[in-house]
Image (tube, helix red, strand yellow):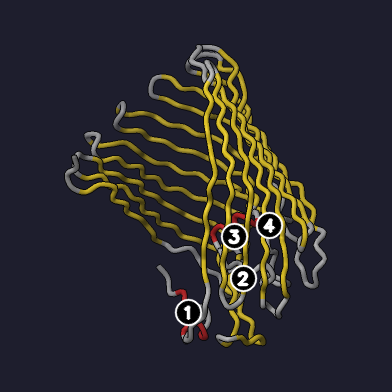
Amino acid sequence: FGSYRNIQEDLKHTSGTFDGHDFSNRFGVDGRVDWSKSILTYDVGFSTIAAKDTIIKRSYNAVDVAARFRSNNDSEQYFYYDGGVSMSFGKDAFTTHYPVPFGNKNISENIISFNGSFGPVMSYVSSILFDVNMTMVYYGDFLKANVGSMSITPKYQFDKNRWNFSLGVKIGAITKSDDTVQDGHIKMFQNDSQVFYPDVHISYEAIKSYLTFYGYVTGGDHINTYRSVLSNYHFFEPLASNGSNAMLDNTQEKINFAAGVKGNVATRFQYDLKAGYAVVDKGMFDKVVRNAYVYGATGRLYCPEVIFADYKSFYSQLLFAWKSRNVTVDGDVHYQTTKFQHPENNMFKPPALKGNIRPFKIGKTG
């Protein structure tokens, strides 16, 4: 919900046509191997994005490899482990006309991630675990940069009767370098870690199997990779941010706390309602770049771009589902207020209200 065409007067007056395309796909193979007390899963795939408009033509391809090994033990006391490794090797080959025809360019990106949880299960109701997360990203060809994110979260977990606690503290760190040589280039990935973040989750089952109250306080670091941007914006123009803001940066969720209630009514209607507040540094948002000096087949040149901005947000969310013999429907409704610390022109503020409804089955079957 928003009058987005008010960003620039010129955007109200559009005309003409152009040839283009927008395509994305992923295919691969996955599998699972079970042992008496362990489970191994794996996934190998190939991802592709192909897009073309009046500004950019691109072909992005990536090979993905992932594996996870975890315990499957119902003993009262044992050592719990759950660890996964994923790797992505991608390259974006693109031709751009912004701000002038640049010809063919390539950006390669290699992502290596590990995430896991390890520790002793002391009884059926309590355990001490250590969550470990590491991500390293390496860039080549047109960009020369790398960035890494690491965190460890010691936590105590307790689950007895109607109470469930997970009490932890996340300790994070960011490593980065940016050696890109480009006129007007603003260094990427310069946002640092807050180092200490809360990681607390509490729930109480007021009516067994029907009503649960819960709350959490969390935070952490997130690397916005080139691939994550392309996945959301197939026509993303890498050079549009030149001289105005960093093309990529790290998001720091300083704190995020919420409280909610979830349950069901007669097992038919299921719901999960929560409200919360978040303080975020360098969150990623949409932006439109306008170049008054470059003219193409459609007149003035406009480029989709992303921008990273600090903001505070109050949010609420309702997830719901209705399941019966003849009707199965689920959906979600989200409300959010966003207050930027330093708003800029041509930024897209997230919609205040949005939602979805998904009918899976309507009418008798069988």
Q: Earlier in the sequence, mark 2 or mark 4?
A: 2
Tell me whether the residue at label 4 lies in contact with that at label 3, contact meaning CB atoms closer than 8 angstroms.
no
Identity of the amino acid at label 1? Asn
Tell me whether the residue at label 1 lies in contact with that at label 2, contact meaning CB atoms closer than 8 angstroms.
no
Query: Which residue has dot 4 on it?
Result: 91
Q: Which mark is residue 230?
A: 3
Gap in angstroms between the C-alphas marked 4 and 3:
11 Å
Local crowd at mark 3 within 10 Å, few (<14), some, or many (≥20)? some
Q: Earlier in the sequence, mark 1 or mark 4?
A: 1
Gap in angstroms between the C-alphas marked 3 and 2:
13 Å
Q: Is 136 located above or below residue 165 in the figure?
A: below
SS label for mark 2: strand
Local crowd at mark 2 within 10 Å, few (<14), some, or many (≥20)? many
Q: Which mark is residue 6?
A: 1
Gap in angstroms between the C-alphas marked 1 and 2:
27 Å
Query: Which residue has dot 2 on it?
Result: 57
Identity of the amino acid at label 2? Lys
In the rendering, at what x and y percent does residue 47 appear? 58, 52
158 sits left or right of 109 in the view: left
Tell me whether the residue at label 2 lies in contact with that at label 4, contact meaning CB atoms closer than 8 angstroms.
no
Identity of the amino acid at label 3? Leu
